[in-house]
């Protein structure tokens, strides 16, 4: 997995960011953690996964760009709304995938 350089985090997770990422990388059990990734299907924009899914041996997590981390599904949905609002405010459009990939290439 790769992590978006401007990773979105729900409020309260900023201080735990490194610990959560380390646990994700080490396949540790974190039932309340949800990740938001760019969708594998380019026709879609984002997908939400419970981190438990990542523990499956057959899950192809090498291909994912994690753009957000939330605690709980409701917070993950709220974070997707915040990302969508930011994209709209910046571009007056809703092409979340293009916006994230462009920002990832900057700097």
Image (cartoon, rainbow, N blue to C red):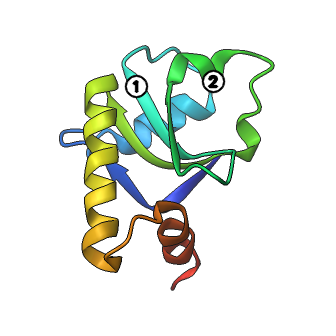
Q: Is residue 72 visible?
A: no
Characterize the local packing of mark 2: few (<14), some (14-19) or many (20 or more) Cα atoms within 10 angstroms. some
Residue at 54% in and 70% down:
98
In whole angstroms, how far apart are the C-alphas of marks 2 and 1? 11 Å
Foreground pick, 44 / 49 = 44
Percent across and percent down for residue 5 are: 49, 64
Secondary structure state at the residue bearing disc 2: helix
Percent across and percent down for residue 50 are: 48, 22
Percent across and percent down for residue 54 are: 63, 23
In the image, residue 37 above or below residue 19: below
- Residue holding disc 2: 54
Q: Which badge, 2 or 1, is on the more N-terminal residue?
A: 1
Left or right position of 13 against 43: left
- Residue holding disc 1: 33
Q: Which mark is residue 62?
A: none
Percent across and percent down for residue 95 are: 47, 66
Residue at 37% in and 43% down:
17
């Amino acid at each position: 997995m790769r992590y978006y350089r401007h990773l979105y985090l729900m409020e309260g997770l900023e201080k735990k960011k490194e610990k959560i990422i380390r646990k994700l990388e080490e396949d540790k059990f974190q039932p309340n953690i949800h990740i938001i990734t760019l969708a594998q299907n380019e026709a879609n924009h984002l997908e939400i996964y419970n981190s438990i899914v990542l523990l499956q041996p057959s899950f192809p997590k090498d291909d994912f760009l994690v753009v957000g981390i939330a605690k709980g599904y409701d917070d993950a949905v709220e974070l997707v709304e915040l990302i969508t609002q930011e994209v709209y405010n910046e571009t007056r459009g809703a092409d979340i995938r293009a916006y994230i990939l462009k920002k990832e290439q900057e700097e």
